[in-house]
Amino acid sequence: MRILLASPDRDFLEAYEKLLCDEFGYVKTAFDGTAVLSLLKEQDFDVCVIDSKLPRVNYRTIVSRLDAKKIPSVILVYKGMSPALLCLKDPVTEYMPLPFPPGELKSVITRADGSYGETVSYDTGTGNISYKNNRIGNSPVTLSEKQLLKFAAENSGDGGDGTDIQYGMSCTESLNRKFAEEGCQAKIKYINGKGFMLVDSR
Amino acid sequence: MSKAEKKFLWYAVLAVFVLLAVILGVINIVNFTMAASDADELTQRIADQHGTLNIRTFDRPGGMNAPGTPGGDTGWGGRSDIMGPDSPEMNNSLRFFTVAYSKGFETGELIEYRISAISESEALEMADSLKEGKTGWVKGIYRYRVYSDEGRIFITVVDQGRELHPSYRILIISAIGGIAGVILSYLFLNMVRNKVFAPLKDADRKQKQFISSAEEEFKMPLTVISAQNEILEKEYGVNEQTASIRKQVAGMGRVIRKLSSLAIYEDNAGTKTEVDLSGLVNERIERKSREFVERGISVGKQIEENISFNCDADAMKKVFDELVTNAIKYSVTHFNVRMSKANERIAVIFSNDTSLEDGIYDNAFDRFTTLKNAAAAEGHNDGLGLAYVRDIVRSHGGRCSARAEKGEFILTIAL
């Protein structure tokens, strides 16, 4: 897997270049946004990990370029995973709130790879919800949101209530907003005794 | 208006109300007491004169203009002895009647009748009704005295209506003035509360900003340390030092995540749904049951079933996780949880035995505050857990309190 790692923190780049290289084989690093755009012109990558505080070029510009090339992006954020962040229209594959252990980043990179190729559809009983190219309609969805959606759609009430899903409630709120914007007749609801479920919103 | 501002406003207005009530109350009580005293003096004079009244001009040599008499002939001002009961005009202006009874209170005889507002028969009736008394007010404006003289019982009733009129006027003015004072103080305090609270709000904002900036600055270094530690472990193997680094980084990561959660929660309170709170509390305790057993802590539960609550399920789960974790850390031999619902109010009470002295421990809910028993407890004590609990509970319109009583630490959540 070819990975692009971009951060203004050199120690971070040094440590993770080694770790990710050992895991995935090929890693290129960039210290600022301009370097990232140059690298993207020269070669293709499978996944890009970008620090949200990258200088020179705003990360959102880089994410748009990556989305155009269907390259998954993992954005390192400092403020935590809030519904407001998830509702931004940026086509980010996944947000990674700092701090995190190395294993978590490796896991997210693995899941992000190939995510643009996924097409998944869930039946709500009266219609269906589907995502393709990391989008529900025109709204981008992240890996965490997809994970919650999968749980909610498949939840039969006997496998736990889903509140262990990381960022579950933030993702519930953001997904419901996106469903409403796209005119989907569905909603994720926390049902007493059963947990998160995908229900008809009417 | 924040809760603190509301509280300040209410307490300040209450203080003004209490102060005005006390001061005006005392003034009016003294006023009426003095009126009663003046009236008693008159009835005593009548009693001294066997039921009648004949106040003569001053018996001093020279009369009113006698040398050394205060005020002399300077007219109004300084002649307190010709105002009130001592006034020579009292002879002609005092309205009263006296009824005399022979022993046994058989028939009353009106021996002095100098009153227009009451007829003779009414006067006798009134006197009959006052036989059991000694002295006091009747019908609000009449002062009476019952006394014996020459073997007979006398009842004198004096009309003090004109004298009491100014007192009642003062009472009404006091009441109106008091209410106006309270209203004006509320309006004034409401006007100035922004100025009063501005420094506090500013300090609070700066504190949050500082914590937010500080915790952001820690995030990248922690991530880097974690990564470098993994590299060391890969190259040289896991050892005590790398295990310790991993543990410390994990601990600091928890603190940072809690601070982030607090910040996120303050900015965006989560979606609320109807949650089976009884089930949630039971489940959070069950999850940790093995740890309770390992530590030899007995668990008591009195949780009313089917208590549901409209709340952020994720946040509430974290609240009870935090409380159960604290129970494991700080309980000595036993831990108890009670949950009940009455009149739409839910009370959840966590209690455990403790070495803390008796007292109120509401400060345990402040950020970065740990109590005296925290040092002896195992595990990480960052002083943020209960702050998070309080913020979540408050965002749901609830209250938290903590106290220690006779060796028990009692934490109460009211929703």
Image: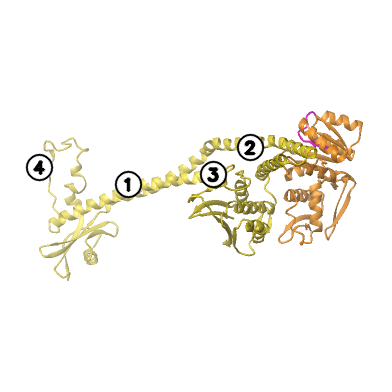
Chain colours: A orange, B yellow
User: Mark 3 or mark 1: which is in front?
Assistant: 3
Nearer to us in this view, A145 or B21: A145
User: Which residue range is magenta in the image?
Assistant: A48-56
> Label 4 amino acid?
Arg
Q: Secondary structure at mark 3?
A: helix
Per the model, the C-alpha gap separating discs 2 and 1 is: 54 Å
> Label 2 amino acid?
Ile
Disc on the earlier residue, 1 or 4: 1
Disc on the earlier residue, 3 or 4: 3
User: Mark 3 or mark 4: which is in front?
Assistant: 3
Disc on the earlier residue, 2 or 4: 4
Q: Secondary structure at mark 2?
A: helix
Chain identifier of the residue bearing label 3 in the image: B
Chain identifier of the residue bearing label 2 in the image: B
Query: To which residue does mark 3 refer?
Result: B4
Q: Position of residue B81 (x, y in %)?
A: 18, 43
Mark 3, Cα crowd under 10 Å, few <14 / some 14-19 / many 20+, is few
Disc on the earlier residue, 2 or 1: 1
Q: Quadrant of the N terminus of chain B?
A: top right
Residue located at (77% from left, 55% from top): A188
User: Mark 1 or mark 4: which is in front?
Assistant: 1
Per the model, the C-alpha gap separating discs 3 and 4 is: 68 Å
Per the model, the C-alpha gap separating discs 2 and 4 is: 87 Å
User: Mark 2 or mark 1: which is in front?
Assistant: 2
Query: To which residue does mark 1 refer?
Result: B27
In the displayed structure, B55 sits above or below B137; it is above
Disc on the earlier residue, 3 or 1: 3
> Label 3 amino acid?
Ala
Query: To which residue does mark 2 refer?
Result: B211
